[in-house]
Image (spheres, grey):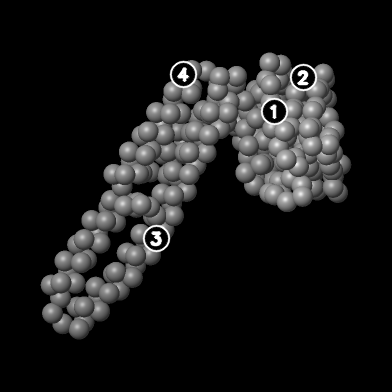
Amino acid sequence: KSPNFSNALREELTAEIAEAEAATTPEGKYAVVEKFSQTFKDIYISKRKYIETISNVEDFVSVTSELYPDFISDEENDEVLALSDAAWTDYENGTLDHDKTMAQLQKLSFIPQVVDNWYEVATPAQLWYISYLVNSGKHDINVRLTTDIDLGGISYFPPIGKQYYPVGPTMYFSGVFDGQFHVINNLRIEMDDAGAETGLFGRLNGATIQNVGIVNATLKNSNALRAGVLAACALSSK
């Protein structure tokens, strides 16, 4: 059952097995083989979609655990955990609906709205989520602030685009970040990760950063690597 797939496909496969057992002619058996071929393709696709969906759900649980309690409320934390429980139940039952599950997750307040291909950021939690997206490999997104962001009281903000030395994942930001003349207040980053660059942006590569101010920033990097309030390293960026 792991990874699981659609229960409807499971029933379809069961019916085809019975049909194969009942087939008595070469033509009939060949017809069933063709059905098997398509059904197994559909099962493969379904399994991949189930894995993708449940992985996304668990990513949201991980993000929530990082954001709670500084950025999100008890109610929203409980909501994410309930959605996770429901998704796992549907996974086990073979009734998991990718589109429905993702639509429910996208309604959470720490998920920025996407308008005309721009992630619109209005809260500290949404800015944190942008960092999570980029550090998960989504490098080339476009982001704009819709208001000032105050990170006061937040002991740790993960750099957007964490680059590790001498070896490790290569994460960088290569999109457009438009502050729309807003400021980010009270940025505090304390990096103890081995080899991580430190700044609002850890590493930029082909990025454009514009119209944003940073007020009252504190950076600490225990590994004596590059650090900068806006960015630790900027390659082919402006």
Q: Which residue is mark 1?
A: 157
Q: Give the mark nearest the N terminus, 4 or 2.
A: 4
Q: Nearer the viewer, mark 3 or mark 1?
A: 1
CA gap, disc 2 and disc 3: 48 Å
Q: Which residue is mark 4?
A: 75
* Type of amino acid under label 1: Phe
- Contact flag, marks 2 and 1 (Cβ < 8 Å): no
Residue at the bottom extreme? 26
Q: Secondary structure at mark 3?
A: helix
Q: Which mark is residue 83?
A: none
Q: Secondary structure at mark 1?
A: loop
Q: Give the mark nearest the N terminus, 1 or 4.
A: 4
Q: Give the mark nearest the N terminus, 4 or 3.
A: 3
Q: Quadrant of the C terminus?
A: top right
Q: At 83% from the left edge and 30% from the top edge, which residue is drawn?
A: 229
* Type of amino acid under label 2: Asn
Say whether residue 85 is visible.
yes
**With respect to residue 215, does 48 lie above or below?**
below
Q: Which residue is mark 3?
A: 44
* Residue 149 x, y percent position in the rendering: 72, 21
* Type of amino acid under label 3: Tyr
**With respect to residue 132, does 48 lie above or below?**
below
Say whether residue 116 is visible.
no
* Residue 188 x, y percent position in the rendering: 75, 23
Q: Give the mark nearest the N terminus, 2 or 3.
A: 3
- Contact flag, marks 2 and 3 (Cβ < 8 Å): no
Within 10 angstroms of label 4, few (less than 14), some, or many (20 or more) residues?
few
**With respect to residue 134, does 8 lie above or below?**
below
Residue 91 left/right relative to 121:
left
Q: Which residue is mark 2?
A: 185
Closer to us: 45 or 156 = 156
